[in-house]
Amino acid sequence: MINTSGSHTCTFNNWINLVLFCLNILLPIASYSQDQTRADSIEKIYNSSNKAKQDLKVLKGLAENTIAPYMKLKFSKELLKHAKKQDSSSYLYSGYLQKGNALASRGDFSDALESYFKAASVAKNEKELGLIKVTLGDVYSLTKNHDRSINYYNEAIEIFRRTKDSLTLGSVIFNAGDGYLKNNEIDKAISYLEEAEVIFENINFSLGLAYCSGTLGLAFAKLGRNEEAEKNIKQAIQTLEKEEDYSPICEFLNGMSDIYTEKDQDSTAIEFASLSRELAKMYGFKNEVREANLKLAQLYEKTGNMSEAYYFYKEYIVYKDSVLNVSTAQNMAGLRADYEVAQKQAEVDLLSEQRKNQQLVVISIAIASFLICLLAFGLYRRNRFIKRTSAIIEKEKNRSELLLLNILPEETARELKKNGKVRAKKFESVTVLFADFKRFTLVAEKLTPERLIKTIDYYFSKFDKIMEKYDIEKIKTIGDSYMAASGLPFPNPDHASRILMAAFEMIQFVKETKENSLYDDADFDVRIGLNSGPVVAGVVGTKKFAYDIWGDTVNIAARMESHSDIGRINISENTYELIKRKFDCEYRGEVEVKNGRILKMYYVHHAREKENKIAG
């Protein structure tokens, strides 16, 4: 099994896990929008009446098809509640399975396993039991318990050998073979992988064949069978390129580098590792970038080129200890610590005032002659205490609300406060912006972490002000990338024009900062990409909330940004159709996106109507 830890190619196992978690066993994955559309349709029935909210079939459909983990968990719990009331074992099985899927997708593997074991206890046939064993194997593989993972895969294999489900059988055998490879049991790994390859060949499953071929290549390389390894890995890469599945290609390129290292052909090994690094950087696969940098550092050290070895090892360290993860963790920890200190201070103040009041009561009883004065004094202190306590509570309440509004859009925050949850919503037409800094790594490695964080904050703070000016929703930052969306949470007919004007201001700000040296260490260039279309928006998480958007529109916007140039705004054909009458655009060619679609791209130069001020 190929897991998300990065020790192997990871996409194929993610693909299998997602499918198994959705109960669409090893069939091609439907797009997010298709799953969410189906879930939204069922949810309309669910909200139509109280009777529908207790209908097991409706609840099962929502639990199976809802994508957001927190909503999947909610509906699976409701399904379990009503299935127990109606004593339905089949729906109990679905409820426990989908609850486990929701927990696993959030990384709560311990609770997920508990739910899967409960599902196994109520399974009514071999196929359901086999599915649970596959899922348990996947979870144990993700948590690096490979011995137990392989045991569950083998138990599942015995079950599916008695069925006619060749795709499921082949995939489970492949996962077992990958598990043996991780345990360094090479001969067993090759045996299982070759059997899976035969099954995939019989059913003409090209993607499965590519993963088998590439993983066999890695196994052959460990045995020193370099010619066979090279042949298999090249064949896998060719297929994966057609499928636009680039993450495993990076890993297989590193495998090719290992092969040529064994042959003492270091220059060729460096070429393959460099190609893996560039491809991983192009598509933002940080783990693969890290591994390629480490491999290049080792190869240059081997050849005696210590300056290059030092350069790539430094970049390896940068990706290993991500600035984003460190700064985000520190910020969130700081906010939480501040809040907890304030809460504790309020408790101390409360206890202090209570003790003083108790002393006043004792004194008033002991000294009768001063009873009236002490009582008046006690009432005065009590009134002051109540006002002070109320002020502390009000201050913390306002602080919590401001923090929530800083994380979520105002409408979303109100819904969360009112209902304790936020429903995912589909927006038919928004424009998504991606921006990132060129030469970020080269500049970043010269700065201390403190100066780097201050520099990034300088740029992103200005970007935030620009978004606020044009009434655009900032979604998130990822390292040196900045993401925003126009047209949500409130639909806006001129969303594309607004975000384009904001994009021009972002580019102008970055340009002026660099040319005029307005800020120390600010030596970055920016590129921007835009795409328009439908998205689904919602809140992720139950403790640390995050407002996010999903869909092909987001993926294509990221693709537009990666194909843009320094200081340019690259837009898709979808956005062009919305703004072509207001802005001068330059056609610059086509790009292929998912599912074989071809989209035209345009550079945007300036607004035709200079006097048209879009922002408020």
Image: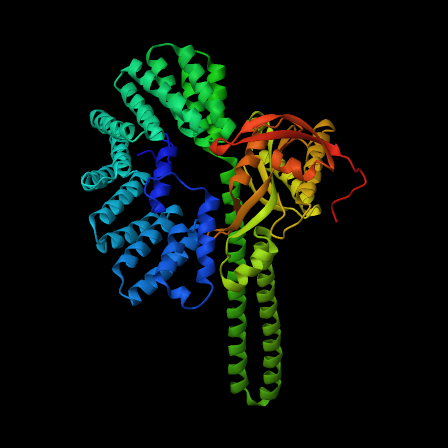
- Measured as percent of width and height from the top left, residue 90 is found at 27, 57
* Residue 95 against residue 190 in the figure, above or below: below
Residue in front for this viewpoint, 327 or 439: 439
Residue in front for this viewpoint, 494 or 281: 494
Residue in front for this viewpoint, 186 or 378: 186
Residue in front for this viewpoint, 339 or 542: 542
Q: Is residue 525 visible?
A: no
* Residue 335 against residue 284 in the figure, above or below: below
- From the viewer's perspective, is 204 left or right of 74? left
Residue at horizontal 59 percent and vertical 55 percent from the top: 405
Q: On the image, which quarter does residue 385 sit in?
A: bottom right
- Measured as percent of width and height from the top left, residue 34 is found at 46, 46
Count of numbered circles on the image:
0
Q: Is residue 136 visible?
A: yes
The residue at the far bottom in this view is 369
- Measured as percent of width and height from the top left, residue 431 is found at 62, 42
Residue at horizontal 57 percent and vertical 36 percent from the top: 557
Residue at horizontal 61 percent and vertical 29 percent from the top: 601
- From the viewer's perspective, is 279 left or right of 231? right
- Measured as percent of width and height from the top left, residue 162 is found at 18, 40
The residue at the far right in this view is 611
Quarter of the image where the N terminus is located? top left
* Residue 403 against residue 279 in the figure, above or below: below
- From the viewer's perspective, is 589 left or right of 163? right
Q: On the image, which quarter does residue 180 sit in?
A: top left
Q: How is the image coloured?
A: rainbow
